[in-house]
Amino acid sequence: MRVTPDEKRFTAIYDACRQHVWAYAVSRAGRQVADEVVSETFAVAWRRLADVPDPALPWLLGVARNVLRDSHRADVRRESFAYEVGRWTARPAGDIAEDVAERLAVLRAMATLPEGDREILILVAWHGLAPRDAAKVVGCSPAALRVRLHRARRRLLRAADTAPGETGQGETGQREKQQGARPGTRPQVGIIGEEMS
Amino acid sequence: MNDVLRTLSEARPDELNPDAPVGHDVRRMELARAMTAGDDTAARGKRRRVRPVWALGLAGAVAAGALVAVTVIPAGTGPAGDPGGGQAVDAKTVLLAAAERADGQPDTVRAYWYRVLVASHTHTVGSAGARYTIVTREREESWMPSEPGVKAWSRHRYLGAKPATEADAEAWRRAGSPRRFEVALPIAPGSKIAKPRTVFEAGAGPVRSVRGTPMVDGNKIYWIGHNVTMREVQSLPADPERLKAELMRWYDGRGTEGGGPARAEMWLYNVAQGLVMELPVRPRVRAAAFRMLAGLPSVKSLGRVRDPRGRAGDAVAVDRKTPGGVVRHRMIIDSSTGTALATENIMLNPKDGKGGPAGRAMSSVVTLTAEWTDSGPR
């Protein structure tokens, strides 16, 4: 009854990366799908353990990304993500501190961006990945990643600056359609699948 | 909004913090699931909910919340009332008697270890001010091959959800008798991080069969503090001291279910409980596990009780402090055969009244059948 070196390594990878994978899946397509994505991702990692590089995180997030793409259609991802953002930004009405309001505004603004923008922003801002590692996740060159990050950041800034203040606050589960209809925000366009591919 | 990226990183919801701990139960389940998923099932991209047989004791997708949610039978009073009353025999006597009986069971290994169980979980649902408790139940049937290379099978059915007690049923009716219940599952007792909301249907679901992958050596199908193969389960030592030493090799200072450090004894109790309830160990090893439990000072006797199926047995338990309150890990033993009938996790004194009424079972697993058989699923 020994733990094999493979098991030991796999367990260490799991311990270091599991919450990242889960959080990534939640921030891409909502929590309804996150557990399944985690399961699937680590099943792949175990099966292909010899291929898993060190550090493993970019590779794992790349797998999770493929699992998401293969198992959930873009419109399903978008809808469950919209629901997720509704949860994040739901706050009781009333006075909130300015920095909190600013964060909520940025979250809502992010939700209006195309999925490709969102993904890169999340990898960098929430997972702390260097552009080089984020590039591995999405499968492009580091140079291309930097350009895409730059553009995504600019679009986020624009969306946050033009987003209406407190409308929709406290309401969960709003569809992106409705968000798109709000004045000043970018309309939701059906290019999400394409951008991701 | 000068640096929008910085604001964005500050805006990350707390629950997505990658440094948040993973519930030990979730960890155990996911690791085992990953390492038992075969080539033909992994990464196919379809929606798939394969539950490895080792996870049976955890029962279900809700396993993550198992410790927080619970059975609904107040401690010590089964649905039919507890039999016997009388003076409780001490735990040591109960466990040694069980060991004696287990020792006498035939030591025959057949083609499959066949096990049928019903697991239940309680959940608090409803809106603020009108909360009530429901119980969900699931039935699992599994055939684990004794030989490597043979497929494992399991059959699973969600049996539905219903209000736990008459008072809960009243609250449920006031709420409009909903047929679906939405539950947010905390990761661990006392944890602020809620897992994905899960919806339970009132009605039973279809029977789902899972044909597993071939069991080759190296495939871990059971868990005794770490994942083990059928062969490893079969070759556990039959001496209580050696068994204890073997199990303790995997003790890492934590509890099996998260929620902070647990004493080694608590850990040993939980692992041994799983071993006698679930695992196809040789009868002498089961006897050794009972003897080992008899030697643990914190195991107490609770006297004659009924299990959630109404079967009479002798209860032993260990109480454990968790952030959510004291949880009693209770096991009901049929001392006449040396088998474990059921295990329950009971919330003795929920903190902040969050875990529901005191004495409520949060979860239970009842073994209906656990035996070697030559016939596979029909």
Image (cartoon, helix red, strand yellow):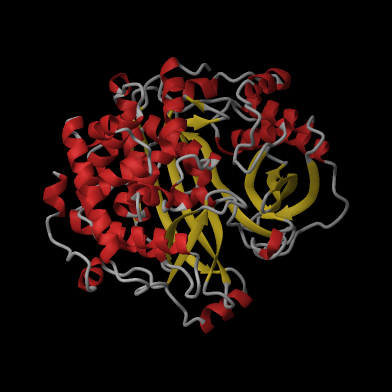
What is the tally of numbered marks visible in this picture? 0
- For image coordinates 33% across by 29% down, the residue present is A45
Give the residue at the far right of this rendering: B87
The percent position of residue B194, horizontal first and vertical second, equals 50, 55
- For image coordinates 28% across by 21% down, the residue present is A51
Q: In which quarter of the image is the N terminus of chain B?
A: bottom left
Quadrant housing residue B236 = top right
In the rendered view, tell whether residue B310 sits above or below residue B53. below
State left or right for residue B6 relative to residue A197. right
Q: Quadrant of the C terminus of chain B?
A: top left
Residue B41 in view:
no
- For image coordinates 48% across by 40% down, the residue present is B55
- For image coordinates 19% across by 33% down, the residue present is A139
The percent position of residue B77, horizontal first and vertical second, equals 73, 62
Quadrant housing residue B197 = bottom left
Q: Nearer the viewer, residue A129 or A157?
A: A157
Q: Which of A2 and B295 is in front in this view?
A: A2
State left or right for residue B60 relative to residue A27. right
Residue B222 in view:
yes
State left or right for residue A55 relative to residue B335. left
In the rendered view, tell whether residue A63 sits above or below residue B78. above
The percent position of residue A103, horizontal first and vertical second, equals 40, 58
The percent position of residue B316, horizontal first and vertical second, equals 75, 44
